[in-house]
Image (cartoon, helix red, strand yellow):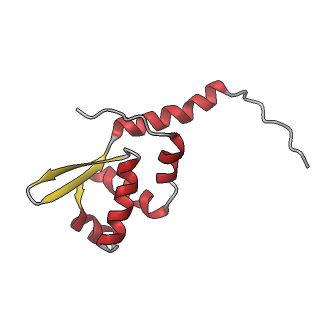
Amino acid sequence: MYSTVEIPADKAFHALSDPLRLQIIESLREKEFCVADLCEHLNVSQSKLSFHLRVLKEAAIVRSRPQGRWTYYSLNLPQIVTLEQHLADFRYLTRLTPAPANF
């Protein structure tokens, strides 16, 4: 069973701030991938992909599981739900009227 990990919000949102990492997340919505297949799917080098997967793993957005000589990556959905809740809290805990603009 996978659970959430206490990750600072700035680290998690930083992990989501790169276009390639967003493409990785979109790809992992479809199915889990090993690095070789994900490299081919996204047309990126293994070293570049590994760097971005590490950032996503450190933010607990992606999880990995070994199978034989391969490692498969998938989304850590409980952590994504935690991030969604973090954003939703702003809606309920912040006043709804925007502050006046200071020009």
Front residue of 47 and 85: 47
* Image coords of residue 61 (percent x, y): 38, 46
Give the residue drawn at x 57%, y 29%: 89
Quarter containing the N terminus: top left
Give the residue drawn at x 33%, y 42%: 76
In the displayed image of the protein, which residue is found farthest to the left?
68
Relative to 24, does residue 9 appear above or below in the rendering?
above
* Image coords of residue 63 (percent x, y): 29, 47
- Left or right, 74 with respect to 23, comes to left
How many numbered dots are placed on residues in this image?
Answer: 0
- Left or right, 45 with respect to 85, comes to left
- Left or right, 31 with respect to 10, comes to left
Give the residue drawn at x 41%, y 60%: 23
- Picture quadrant where residue 26 is located: bottom left
In the displayed image of the protein, which residue is found farthest to the right?
103
Relative to 76, does residue 17 appear above or below in the rendering?
below
Visible in this render: residue 26? Answer: no
- Left or right, 53 with respect to 36, comes to right
* Image coords of residue 68 (percent x, y): 8, 56
Relative to 3, does residue 55 appear above or below in the rendering?
below
Give the residue drawn at x 48%, y 62%: 19
Visible in this render: residue 33? Answer: yes
Front residue of 57 and 26: 57
- Picture quadrant where residue 79 is located: top left
